[in-house]
Image: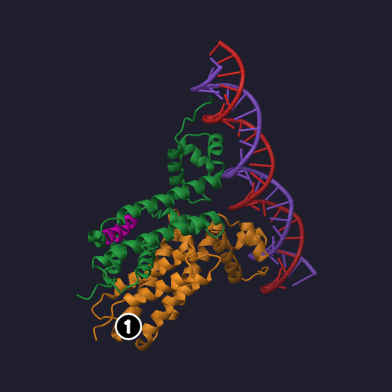
Chain colours: A green, B orange, C purple, D red
Amino acid sequence: MARPRKFDEQQVLDTAREQFWSGGYAATRMEDIAGATGLGKGSLYGAFGGKQELFHRVFDAYCGSVVDAVSRQLCGNDADAYARLSAHVYAVAAATAADTAHRGCLLAKGTAELAEHDETVAQRAHAAIEALRALLEDAIAACQRNGDIAADADPGKLAALVLAVLRGIEALGKAGADEETLTDIARTALAVLPRPAH
Amino acid sequence: MARPRKFDEQQVLDTAREQFWSGGYAATRMEDIAGATGLGKGSLYGAFGGKQELFHRVFDAYCGSVVDAVSRQLCGNDADAYARLSAHVYAVAAATAADTAHRGCLLAKGTAELAEHDETVAQRAHAAIEALRALLEDAIAACQRNGDIAADADPGKLAALVLAVLRGIEALGKAGADEETLTDIARTALAVLPRPAH
DNA sequence: AGCGTTATGGACGAACCAGTCAAGAACTGA
DNA sequence: TCAGTTCTTGACTGGTTCGTCCATAACGCT
C-alpha cells in the first residue's frame, strides 16, 4: 500500500549509538547521523521524531543491552556463581582497559551529560543501575549459598559495593588509568570480599 | 599606564566554573558566562582567549582544588589516619547524596564529556586521579603503621580500590542512588579493608 | 593636561544546526 | 494500470553561537 522503508531501524539505532557514544549528545549533529547511516535528514526525523527522542531510543536500548549482557554473565547455577562473579569483575576491568579511545560507557557518559536536565535519561539510568545492583545481589547470594562468600554478610550491601567498584573502574579508565591498575582494582576488590570462616 | 581591569579574574573563573559545571561544556554558552559575570564578551575573550581555554583554566583550577581539599582531609599524624580516611570516605558519600541537583563532580563530568577528544583535559584528569591515588596510598600506609590496616596488604592496591569506590559512589550518585545506598557503600568499603590479625 | 596603553561592551559577521517542507519515488491493492 | 499511501532527498528557514571589531573609557607617566 505504501512505500516501504529502505533502512533497518535497528541498524540506524546502532549507528546513531556509535555517533552519540563518540561525540556525546550535544556535540553530535543530526547530520552526522544522517551521513553515517546514509539516510536523509527527513527520513531520520520521520522515523524517530527528533534528536532528543532518537537519543532516548538509543540510550534505552543501550541500557537494556548492558543489563542483558551482565545478566547473561552472572546468571547460572550456584556452584559456579563465584567464578562467574569473578570473571565479570575482571571482564569489566579488561574491557575498560581495552577501550583505548576512552569512550567509556554510554550509560555513564549519557548520565554525566544529561541526567541533570533530562528526567527521562535520569530515570532510565537509575533503573539500569538498580537492575545491575539486583543482578549482583543475586550473584552474591548464590556465592553465599555455595560457601564462597561469608553467609553473615549482607548481599545487598556487598552488591552495592561491587557495583560502585565497577562504576569506579569505568570512571578511572576514562581518566586514563592503565590496564594494570584496573586489573589490580578488580583483583583487590574480589580479594577483600568476606570469605566464610573455614 | 593602562586602563585597569574592573573584574577579579578569580571570581570570573569561579562563576564560569558554576556555569560549566551545571551545563557541561558544549551546552554552556560564552554569553551565559558573560551574563553571569556581568562582563561583556569582548572582555571575556580578551582575558581568557576563548571558550576552550577558559574551560581549561576552570578545569585546572577545579582539579587542583579537589586534590588540595582531599590532601587537607587526609594528611596528618599516623594516630588519626584511619579516622581521617574513614571520615573522608563518608564525606564523599554524604556530599554526593547532598548534591540533589546531581551535578556530580566537574572532574568526572568534564572527563566524561571531553577527555576523549581533548588531550589537555585528559592529561589534567589523569594527573588529578593519580594525585588522589597517591594521597590515599599515603593515608593507608599511615593506617598500617598505626596498626589499623593489615600491614601485609599492598597500600597502593588498596588505595586504587578505595579510589575506585569513591569514583563509583560519585557515578552512582549521578545516576540517582539514594543517600542510604551511598552511605552503605562507604561503610561496607571501610569494613572490608583488611584489619591486622590481633 | 596630553599621550600611550589596555579594558569595556555591544553590535556585527559568519558559520552552524535542528527541524520543516515539497516534489518526487516506491510500493500495494483494486 | 491507476490511485492512494508512505518514504526519500536535499534545499531551505529561523534561530543560535563563537569569535571579532571598534568606538570609547580609564588609568599612569611625562
Residue A170, visible in the rendered structure = no
Provide the chain ID for the residue under circle 1. Answer: B
Q: Position of residue A82 (x, y in %)?
A: 25, 62
Q: Position of residue A156 (x, y in %)?
A: 37, 68
Q: Quadrant of the C terminus of chain A?
A: bottom left
A60 and A32: which one is in front?
A60
- In the picture provided, is C25 more to the left or to the right than B120? right
Quarter occupied by residue C20: top right
Residue range corresponding to the magenta coloring: A84-97
Residue at screen point 36% across, 59% down: A135
Q: Is residue A88 magenta?
A: yes
How many numbered marks, from 0 up? 1
Amino acid type assigned to the residue bearing label 1 in the image: Cys
A193 and A11: which one is in front?
A193
Query: Residue placed farthest to the left in the image?
Result: A198
A52 and A159: which one is in front?
A159
Q: Position of residue B159 (x, y in %)?
A: 33, 73
Q: Position of residue B19 (x, y in %)?
A: 59, 63
Residue at screen point 44% across, 48% down: A61
Location of mark 1 (residue): B143
Residue B55, visible in the rendered structure = yes
